[in-house]
Image (spheres, helix red, strand yellow):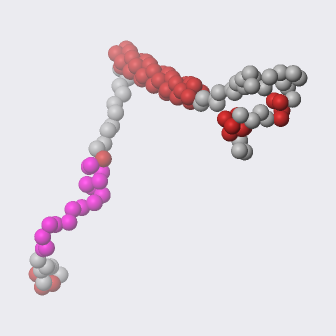
Amino acid sequence: MHLPDEQFRAGHIPTELYRQIPPGSDLRTIVIVQEAPRSYVGPIVLVVVKVAGGIAVLLVIAFVVQVIAGAAIAVLSATCGVTYSLNRKSRRRELARGRRKRPSRSQTVRSNNRYRK
C-alpha cells in the first residue's frame, strides 16, 4: 500500500487527513471524497480546433488573393493591353529529354570498315 488510492480502498486514513478531523468524531461515519483525475480531452480538442481553424483561414486568404490577382490581371489586360501567360512545362517531357530509353533488344554492331574515314 504505497499509493493513497490503495490506502483509501483499504480503509486507512492518511495522517494529514487524520489531523484535520475534529476530535470526538466517529471515524466510521466520515466519508473522504477524492478529486477526479484530470481529463486531457478538452485541451487536446481545443488545440486541434485552433490548428484546423488557422489552416482554414490561411486557405481562405490564399483563395481571395488568387481571385483578386486574377481580377486585376483581367482588368489590366482589358484596359492597358497587358498580358500574362503561364508557361507550364510537362515534367515528363523534361525527363524524356534528359534520359534516353535503351532499346529493348540488342543491336548489331557494324564493323569499322563500314564507317567513313
Instruction: Name the quarter where the N terminus is drawn.
Output: top right
Q: Give the residue at x 83% y 30%.
A: 18
In front of the other: 45 or 100: 45
Q: In terms of image quadrants, where is residue 16?
A: top right
Provide residue 73's location: percent of width, then percent of height.
39, 21
Give the total number of marks visible in the rendering.
0
Question: Vertical placement of 60 versus 44: above or below?
Answer: above
Seen from the viewer's position, the closer of residues 65 and 17 is 17
Residue 44 in the image: state x and y as whole percent. Answer: 56, 30
- As drawn, which residue projects farthest toward the right? 23
Magenta stretch encompasses residue 95: yes
Q: Is residue 18 left or right of residue 111?
A: right
Q: What is the x, y in percent for residue 79?
A: 37, 14
Residue at the spot 60% in from the left edge and 29% down from the top edge? 39
Of 79 and 94, nearer the camera is 94
Residue 72 is left or right of residue 33, and the answer is: left
The residue that appears at 30% across and 42% down in the rendered structure is 89
Taking the image as drawn, is residue 117 in sight? yes
Q: Position of residue 85 (x, y in %)?
A: 34, 31
Q: Is residue 23 magenta?
A: no
* Residue 5 position (above or below residue 93): above
Q: Residue at x 59, y 30 (%)?
A: 40
Horizontal relation, residue 113 to residue 74: left or right: left
- Vertical placement of residue 41 versus 114, above or below: above
Q: Which residues are magenta?
A: 92-107
Q: Which quadrant of the view contains residue 96?
A: bottom left
Q: Nearer the viewer, residue 45 or 65?
A: 45
16 relative position to 83: left or right: right
